[in-house]
Image: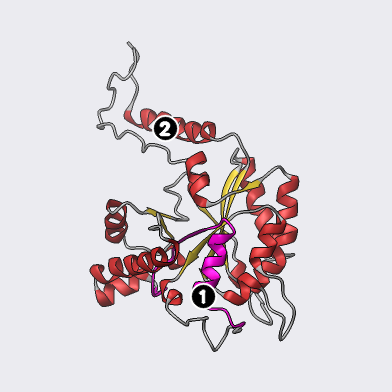
C-alpha cells in the first residue's frame, strides 16, 4: 500500500484541474471584452470634432466578436452618455446597444450604477448592492430580451457575501483573482491609463505591446486562451487594429465570452479531502 500525504494529494488534484482546463480547449481563443458602455461615439465613431473609427467597425473588419459589459443607467430612455466628457453623435445608448447585438456581439452586466461595490455595501447594505446588479441585468434584458449570465464588478471589487449570493442566483463573476485558473482570469489591459489628451501612465512602448507582453507570459505557462479586459474608449479603438492583426498572426480567434466559456471552462472545483496525514488514497 502507498501512503500519500494530504498536502501531496492537494498538489495532485490542483495539477489535474489545470490539466483538465488545458485539455478542454486546444484552440487559441480570445474573448475581447469592453467595460463602461454603451458609448455611442466609441461604438459607432465620430465625424466631428475629428474623424474617428467606430469600435464595431474595427471588430467587423477583423472578423472579431466581442462582449460588452454595460452599465444599466445608460440604458435609460434618451440617454446618450455623460455630457461633460462624451460626444453626442445623435444616437442614444439604447440604439447603440441594439447595434452591438445586431452585429453578433454579446452584452453582459457591469451593474446599474457603476459604483465600487465594497464601499457601496458599507454605506447602503448588501441588499442594495444585489439590487444594483439586478437593475443592471433588467436594463440589459429590456434591450436584448436575454437575462445576462456574467457580471464584472467595477474594478473587480466585490464583497465575498455578495459574490456568494450572486453565484447562488446563477451569475458567473469575472475576476482577476488568482483563485481562478489563468484561462478563466481576466487580463487587465490597463487601457484606461491611455485615455485623455496627455496620458502620463500609458504602458510603454505602447498599449498593444503591453497586452502582447502579458499574453507572452501566459503562453510561456502553456495558456493559449485569454479574456482581455478593455474599456469603451476611443484610444482603445485606435490601438485595436494593430493588436488584432498581431494576434491573428499567432493563430488566435476572437469569440464572445459565452462561446469562450463553453469551449474553455468551467472546470469542476477541486475535491476537498479531509486532512488526514498518511491517509491511503492509492494502492
Task: Judge whether 2 appears above or below 112 on screen.
Answer: above
The N terminus appears in which quarter of the rendering? top left
At a point 44% along the width and 34% down the height, the residue shown is 17
Residue 131, given in percent of the width and then of the height, sits at: 28, 68
Q: In terms of sequence position, does the residue under pointer 2 or pointer 1 come before the other?
A: 2
Viewer-side label of 2, 1 = 1
Task: Give the magenta part as a residue range.
Answer: 89-115
- Read off the residue under disc 2: 11
On screen, residue 205 above or below 271? below
Label 2 – label 1 distance at C-alpha: 48 Å
Name the one closer to the observer, 42 or 221: 42
Q: Which residue is at 64% across, 50% downward?
A: 215
In the rendered image, the quadrant that contains the C terminus is: top left
Q: In the drawing, does residue 54 fall left or right of residue 168? A: right
Judge whether residue 194 can be spotted in this image. Answer: no
Q: Where is mark 1, residue-wise?
A: 93
Instruction: Give the vertical position of 180 relative to 11 (above or below).
Output: below
**Magenta stretch encompasses residue 110:** yes
Dot 2: element: helix
Q: How many marks?
A: 2
Residue 157 position in % (x across, y down): 40, 64
Q: Quadrant of residue 87?
A: bottom right
User: Circle 2: is it few (<14), some (14-19), or many (20+) Cα within 10 Å?
Assistant: few
Amino acid at each position: 500500500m502507498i501512503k500519500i500525504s494530504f498536502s501531496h494529494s492537494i498538489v495532485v488534484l490542483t495539477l489535474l484541474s489545470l490539466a483538465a482546463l488545458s485539455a478542454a480547449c486546444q484552440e487559441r481563443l480570445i474573448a475581447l471584452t469592453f467595460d463602461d458602455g454603451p458609448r455611442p461615439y466609441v461604438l459607432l465613431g465620430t465625424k466631428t470634432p475629428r474623424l474617428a473609427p467606430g469600435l464595431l467597425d474595427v471588430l467587423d473588419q477583423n472578423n472579431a466578436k466581442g462582449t460588452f459589459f454595460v452599465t444599466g443607467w445608460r440604458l435609460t430612455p434618451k440617454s446618450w452618455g455623460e455630457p461633460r466628457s462624451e460626444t453626442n453623435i445623435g444616437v442614444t445608448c439604447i440604439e447603440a446597444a441594439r447595434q452591438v447585438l445586431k452585429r453578433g456581439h454579446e452584452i453582459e452586466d457591469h451593474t446599474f450604477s457603476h459604483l465600487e461595490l465594497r464601499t457601496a455595501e458599507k454605506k447602503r447594505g448588501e441588499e442594495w448592492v444585489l439590487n444594483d446588479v439586478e437593475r443592471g441585468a433588467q436594463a440589459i434584458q429590456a434591450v436584448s430580451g436575454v437575462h445576462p449570465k456574467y457580471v464584472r464588478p467595477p474594478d473587480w471589487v466585490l464583497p465575498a457575501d455578495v459574490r456568494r449570493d450572486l453565484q447562488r442566483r446563477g451569475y458567473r463573476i469575472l475576476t482577476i483573482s488568482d483563485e481562478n485558473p489563468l484561462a478563466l482570469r481576466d487580463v487587465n489591459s490597463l487601457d484606461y491609463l491611455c485615455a485623455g489628451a496627455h496620458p502620463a501612465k500609458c504602458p510603454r512602448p505602447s498599449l498593444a505591446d503591453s497586452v502582447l507582453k502579458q499574453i507572452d507570459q501566459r503562453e510561456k505557462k502553456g495558456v493559449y486562451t485569454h479574456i482581455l479586459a478593455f474599456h469603451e474608449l476611443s484610444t482603445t479603438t485606435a490601438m485595436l487594429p494593430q493588436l488584432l492583426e498581431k494576434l491573428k498572426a499567432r493563430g488566435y480567434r476572437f469569440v464572445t465570452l459565452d462561446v469562450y466559456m463553453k469551449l474553455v471552462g468551467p472546470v469542476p472545483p477541486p475535491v476537498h479531502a479531509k486532512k488526514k496525514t498518511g491517509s491511503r488514497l492509492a494502492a
